[in-house]
Image (cartoon, helix red, strand yellow):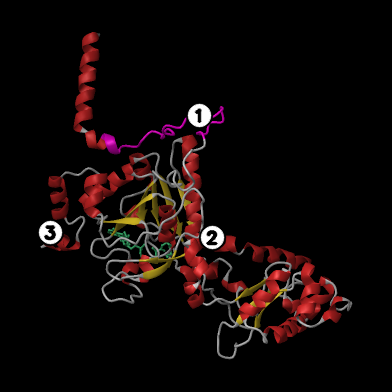
Amino acid sequence: MAKAKKAKAGAKRTARKTSRKVVKLAARKPAKATGAKKANGNGLPRPSAKPYGQAGKALEGVKILDFTHVQSGPTCTQLLAWFGADVIKIERPGIGDITRGQLRDVPNADSLYFTMLNHNKRSITVDSKNPKGKEIIERLIKYCDVLVENFAPGALDRMGFTWEHIHKLNPRMIVASVKGFGPGPYEDCKVYENIAQCTGGSASTTGFRDGPPLVTGAQIGDSGTGLHLALGIVAALYQRNRTGRGQKVLAAMQDGVLNLCRVKLRDQQRLKHGPLTEYSQYGEGIPFGEATPRAGNDSGGGQPGWIVKCKGWENDPNAYVYFITQAPVWEKICDVIGKPEWKTDPDYATPRARLPRLREIFDTIEQWTMTKTKLEVMEICNPLDIPVGPILSMKELAEDESLRKTGTVVEVDHPTRGKYLTVGNPIKLSDSISEVKRSPLLGEHTEEILTKVLGYSAKELAEIKSSGAITAEDKKKAAA
Ligand code: COA
């Protein structure tokens, strides 16, 4: 008995020795809250005594295998990186994320398209179709907590990384994907931003009633879906603390856009019960059709609003202001625009009476705003609680001092392109302060990740290099 036990222990030791590296990388047990003493039975660590902002980042310790490209996926992983996750971006040797070379403004430097979506990440080049490359990715799967991808439907499976395979390698791994559509007739389609805007209900409800559908400049299909995916990942990480296992997270672009357009689906259902009285077409006596119409610049809520011209509009395409005729401040609006008689006139005094007259009301407001600059309108209306919003150009936003101070607009230095402006983390956590670090050069961290993260020896690194798995040049040599 004792002999058998001894032999078993010996065999275990040998097995441990031979597979030491693998053991290190194998799926880990749920992490214990290190050094955290339980407080009064509520299961949470005691509140940190460190000053706010100095107790580590929100997602510190989370490892992301970033298999994303273009905009939607990179938006998601950039956010996770800003919250402190270690994001390892896998790129194709010699090419990288296609956006590195798209819309280039500085010759031979990564484009702003790429740099502005890939801050705070590390880049490793790996050919996922090369056997050695597959091996590296498998080790990364064992090491990381989340794999994020936004390839065309089926591309990850074709590489050999099916959910089943990934889950077998690392049962704790969360596999998060952006796709154009969820399961259904279009699930195999490739999708870009404007396609999602069109299929998610945004285009049919954007623009003027008598014009064609319009897409919006805000990247609600790409960046919007990346945001949705990031929330799904954080939720899955939280659930994993309880279940110990990973899960699939899917954010379809059509779903994300529809979610952002939910007020328009609200209006679709309201149509059954009568006209949409807050739409200016109601006041103009134009009948409604079967679907939610385009509403021009009508306010989406119950408070009528419109974009009106300001002083200088003849030469400045952005000399406009959004003006909301919010009911509680109607009397102040009447005074400001020089129509005090409207306060008591039954045709104007109540929101309901005003609905059929909105066009005339906004024309009158515009007569006043055209005598002021958009910022003067803001200065006059804000102290009176009249909601107005100047139409700010990208130039004005880029130069805005307050946005610089909060880190929403940040200047970043880059070794090949020099200084550029970017949008920093728009979500501010008081105890997890985001710093914006420049995007990585293609493959900048390949060796670092292979040796320091995955533990490959110098000899193994040389083998990997000659296999063509990580460099485009070596790949050609290997093929020759
Ligand atoms: N090594 C080797 N091959 C790699 C690789 C790597 N490191 N990284 C990617 N590839 C391969 C893929 O395996 C795929 O090959 P396959 O077609 O033989 O399977 C190929 O590169 C191209 O990937 P794909 O995703 O099809 O790129 P695309 O340029 O043709 O399509 C999109 C781009 C965005 C339309 C498509 O990826 C897509 O629909 N994604 C989901 C929706 C989405 O995110 N859209 C918004 C983008 S902002």
> Which class describes the residues within 10 Å of circle 1: few (<14), some (14-19), or many (20+)?
few
Type of residue at label 3? Ala
Indicate the secondary structure of the residue bearing disc 2: helix
Residue 310 percent across, percent down from the top left: 64, 84
Left or right relative to 282: residue 259: left
Q: In which quarter of the image is residue 435?
A: bottom left
Please tell me which residue lies in front, 79 or 405. Answer: 405
Please tell me which residue lies in front, 186 or 409. Answer: 409
Task: Find the magenta span and give its range.
Answer: 23-46
Give the label, 3 or 1, closer to the camera: 1
On the question of residue 183 being in view, the answer is no
> Which class describes the residues within 10 Å of circle 3: few (<14), some (14-19), or many (20+)?
few
Instruction: Using the image, tell me which numbered label, if any, was put on residue 478.
Output: 3
**Disc 3 beta carbon < 8 A from ligand 1?**
no
Residue 32 percent across, percent down from the top left: 42, 32
Q: In which quarter of the image is residue 323?
A: bottom right
SS assignment for the magenta stretch, majority: loop
Residue picked out by circle 1 = 38
Is tag 3's residue or tag 1's residue first in the polypeptide sequence?
1
In the rendered view of the protein, which quadrant contains the N terminus?
top left
Q: Are marks 2 and 3 in contact (CB under 8 Å)?
A: no
In magenta stretch: residue 446: no
Type of residue at label 1? Lys
Indicate the secondary structure of the residue bearing disc 3: helix
Q: Is residue 402 above or below residue 460?
A: below
Quadrant of the displayed image that contains ligand 1: bottom left
Is tag 1's residue or tag 2's residue first in the polypeptide sequence?
1
Instruction: Using the image, tell me which numbered label, if any, was put on residue 177.
Output: none
Instruction: Using the image, tell me which numbered label, if any, was put on residue 256.
Output: 2
Q: In this view, does 387 lie above or below 6?
A: below
